[in-house]
Image (cartoon, rainbow, N blue to C red):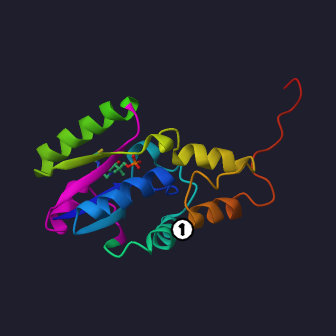
Amino acid sequence: MNAVFPGSFDPITNGHMDVLTRASKIFDHVTVTVMHNARKQGRHLFTLEERLDILRADTGHLSNVSVDSFGGLLVTYMQQQGQGVIVRGLRAVSDYEYELQIAHLNRQLGEVETVFIMAATRWSYVSSSMAREIASYQGDIASMVPPASAAALRRKFQGGGQGQIERGG
Ligand code: PNS
């Protein structure tokens, strides 16, 4: 059975890596696919090519994992892949409601099953947005994201990220 692990991956975190590594032990092949999230449109830090490069570098050691991108509906992509299952990670109960809705939607639209993998509790607080924010203040993100992702974040914010807050402003 093949699986697709879709997401924005802006950039990939250790939580994503945990879910992906465990999925790669369950399924014959896992494709990590960068897709559009309409809720995040125009708010990406990394370009699609940058996100793909980071993913390729950080997942290169997983022999049954490949990296791809797709600009349409997830169910269309699944059809093109000959179906298989969707893998999504859950960090906390707060993720559940949204994921439940999408899983039902994808089953309704394309008869595709979604398999959830609970991210290890040590990654429950890690998100791409938090890693981006911490990196923008030159904070240490080495324990939150894999190496290529960390290097790309550091490069992005080299020479300072966030501006000064004016006193009394
Ligand atoms: O990492 P994210 O942003 O939580 O991933 C969400 C993603 C990209 C998997 C989701 O938005 C998606 O499936 N986008 C493709 C378009 C689609 O099929 N939309 C309908 C379901 S929301």
Instruction: Identify the magenta region.
Output: 66-92
Q: Residue at coordinates 53% horizontally, 53% vertically from top-left?
A: 44
Give the total number of marks visible in the rendering: 1
| Furthest residue in direction right, as rendered | 167
- Left of 10 or right of it: where is 155? right
Q: Nearer the viewer, residue 135 or 14?
A: 14
Quadrant where the image shows the N terminus: bottom left
- Left of 134 or right of it: where is 108? left
- Left of 71 or right of it: where is 17? right
Q: Which residue is mark 1?
A: 50
Percent position of residue 163, x then y: 80, 44
Percent position of residue 157, x then y: 72, 57
Q: Nearer the viewer, residue 156 or 27?
A: 27
Compared to 117, does 11 lie above or below?
Answer: below
Quadrant where the image shows the C terminus: top right
Percent position of residue 150, x then y: 62, 60
Q: Nearer the viewer, residue 48 or 23?
A: 23
Compared to 66, does 117 lie above or below?
Answer: above
Q: Residue at coordinates 25% horizontally, 36% vertically from top-left?
A: 100
Q: Nearer the viewer, residue 123 or 100?
A: 123
| Furthest residue in direction top, as rendered | 168
Percent position of residue 69, x then y: 36, 66
Amino acid of disc 1: Glu
Looking at the rendering, which quadrant does residue 70 occupy? bottom left
Asked whether residue 68 is drawn in magenta, I would say yes
